Image (tube, helix red, strand yellow):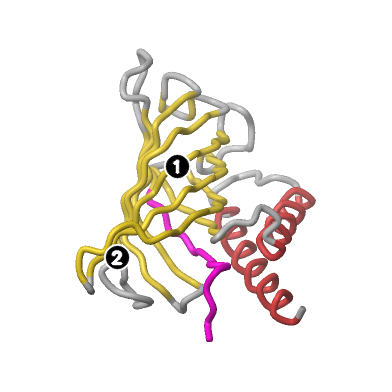
Amino acid sequence: MLHTFKVLKQLLLLIFFTLTANVSFAAEPPSSVWRLGIPVWIGAVAASNVAGADAFAIGTGPSDDVISNEITLRWNQEMGYRFSDDFWLSSYKQFSYTMWQLEGEKLSHDSSNNTIDLIQGFRWNFADNKWISYVDTSLGLSFLANDVIGEKRLGGSLQFTEYTGVGGYFSPRWQWDFGVRHYSNNYMYRDNNGINFYRFIISYNYQKSDR
């Protein structure tokens, strides 16, 4: 019980600072009830792991005048192939929910977006539990609520999403990633502006122990 409480406390603090950091980017953020309720709910999901995930993550980052916040669950973080003692491949499946918001704009349909991402990822590991340990690459499908945000015309609700980044470990349970997430439709639609988000991510690994 004490361990669960400590995890919940850490996650809530992390989510709080992530979300409140983005309040400064919007002239009229959501109501205080919304701002309080969502991170508390996310923290409860993360601490209880009701989805049986291997890892939980939150991320944040900009793309010009658009800010995004991402909530992620990962499964099947498995060894793929070991090329040598110092270089090996692992894989994972990922589900993400992301909210986009135009900087300095009131929250509305035209100034925001919501996406669901279904992703297959690969991790190219070159160290174990070090500050810099791997390179991530992933590809998946995204479903957008709004295909126009600001000057960006994304063409349609179905998009491809790619991510490339580098990461490492604070501890066996806690890790960080920094990279670029790209959305575009590969010209399935007439409009295909695409959008790139620089993304900083903190993850908590349920299946690992800090001992």
Looking at this rendering, what residue extends furthest in the right direction? 33
Q: Position of residue 196 (x, y in %)?
A: 36, 41
Q: Position of residue 37 (x, y in %)?
A: 77, 53
**Residue at (65% x, 44% y) in the render:** 28
**Residue at (29% x, 65% y) in the render:** 125
Q: Is residue 80 above or below residue 28?
A: below
Q: Of label 1 and label 2, which has the lower sequence position?
A: 1
Looking at this rendering, what residue extends furthest in the bottom direction? 211
**What is the C-alpha distance between the residues marked 1 and 2?**
19 Å
- Any mark on residue 119, and which? 1
Q: Is residue 30 above or below residue 84?
A: above
Q: Position of residue 10 (x, y in %)?
A: 63, 73
How would you rate the neighbour count of disc 2 (Cα within 10 Å): few for under 14, some for 14-19, many for 20 or more?
A: many
User: Was residue 210 drawn as part of the magenta stretch in this picture?
Assistant: yes
Q: Label 1 amino acid? A: Ile
**Residue at (34% x, 26% y) in the render:** 193
- Any mark on residue 125, and which? 2
Element marked by disc 1 = strand
Element marked by disc 2 = strand
Q: Nearer the viewer, residue 71 or 137?
A: 137
How would you rate the neighbour count of disc 1 (Cα within 10 Å): few for under 14, some for 14-19, many for 20 or more?
A: many
Q: Which residues are magenta?
A: 198-211
